[in-house]
Amino acid sequence: MSEQTDTAAVPEAVPALDAVPASAPAPEAGHTPVPAPEATEASAEVAQAPKAPEAPEAAPAAVTEAGFPPAPPKDRRRLFAALRWTAAVAVFAAVGTGVAYGITQPERTDIPGLSTEDDGRWTFPELSQPALPAGAPVPQGPDNKDGTHYAKLNGLLLPAPVGARADDTVKADKDGVVSVDGFLEEYTSEAREKLKQSLEWDGLRQITGRGWTTADGTRTHVYLLRFHSSGFVDAFKGCDSNAQLNGVSALDLDDVWSKAKNTQMNSTTLDFPGAANFDGTELSVYQEVKPFLGEEQTKVGCLRTGDVLGMVIQTRKGEVAPLTFHQSVILQSQLLS
C-alpha cells in the first residue's frame, strides 16, 4: 500500500504537453495524478515560450488626411526614361522652330531667284488692313461690285519704312487728313485752280496723306483720295502722264515697270513677296524723263481701285531708285486690295 502511494506521488518526468502522444494510457480509476512541481513549472515555461516569428505581413498603406491612400512611388527607371524622351522632344521642337524661322526669314543667298546681296529695299512695319464696320464687305468681295472701301481711309495709308523721318511738306493733320488746297500744293500754281474745280465736281469725299524721307535722301509722298464711286476716280486727271507736278518737266511711262509687267513680273527689280498681287487695282507708273527740270528726278505711281485713287510720289537727287519706288507702289496696292 505504501509502495503504490510512493509510486503515484512521484511519477516520472512528464514531457511537454505538446509532445504527449495521443495513445498515452488513461489514468486508473480512483486515482487523480498530481503533477510534480517540476512538471508544472516546465508546462508554464512551455506555455509562455514565444512562438517562432512568422513571415511579416505587408504593412497597411498609409492613409492621407483626405481618406485616400497616397499614390505609390514611381519607378525611378520609368521616370528617367520619361525625362529622356521629354528632353528629346524638346530638342526636336527647338530644331523644328529654327527650321521654320529659317524658311520664313531666309538669307537671300540661300534662295534661287533672289538677289545674292542686299538690294537696298526698305524695311516696312508689318502691314495690316484696318477693321471693317460690322457687316461691311471687303473691297474686292463678290457682294461689292463697285469696290467701295468701307474701312477708315487713314488706316489704308502705307506706313513709313523703318528709320525714315516724317516729311512735314505733306499737309496732314494728326489723323492724316489733308485738305484739298494742301494736296494741290503738289501741283504747279497754273494747274491748281482747274484741278480744284474738278475735285469739287467729281465727287471727292476725303483725302489722307503721309510723307517721309529716308537716309539716301529719297522723299516719298503718299495720298489716298476717296470718291463717291469708282466712276469719279477715272474722271480725275491729276494722276497721269499729263500731271503738272511741281518741279517736273515731263512724265513718261516707267520703262522698268513696263518691262517687268510684260515679263509677268519676273524682273529682279520686282522680285519680292506680293509683287504680282494686283487684283482689282489698275496701276500706272510714270517717271520724269531727262533732261530733268532740276537736279532731282520724280516718279509717280497711280493706283485706281474701286472708289479710291492712290498716289505715290518719290523724288530724289540724281535718280529715284527703281526698287524702293516699285516696292512702295506695290505695298500700297496691297493695302487697298
Image (cartoon, rainbow, N blue to C red):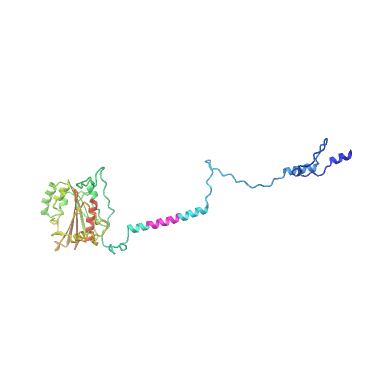
- Position of 17 relative to 184 (above/below): above
- The residue segment tinted magenta is 86-97
Residue 176 percent location from the top left of the image: 22, 49
Residue 154 percent location from the top left of the image: 23, 49
Residue pictured at 33% horizontal, 58% vertical: 103
Taking the magenta stretch, the answer to whether it contains residue 289 is no
Identify which residue, 222 or 264, lies in the foreground. Answer: 264
Residue 246 percent location from the top left of the image: 14, 57
Identify which residue, 51 or 331, lies in the foreground. Answer: 51
Asked if residue 266 lies left or right of residue 293, the reply is right
Can residue 174 be seen in this snapshot?
Answer: no
Asked if residue 336 lies left or right of residue 69, the reply is left
Residue 164 lies in quadrant: bottom left
- Position of 296 relative to 176 (above/below): below
Residue pictured at 49% horizontal, 55% vertical: 81
Identify which residue, 225 or 307, lies in the foreground. Answer: 307
Prevailing secondary structure class for the magenta stretch in the rendered image: helix
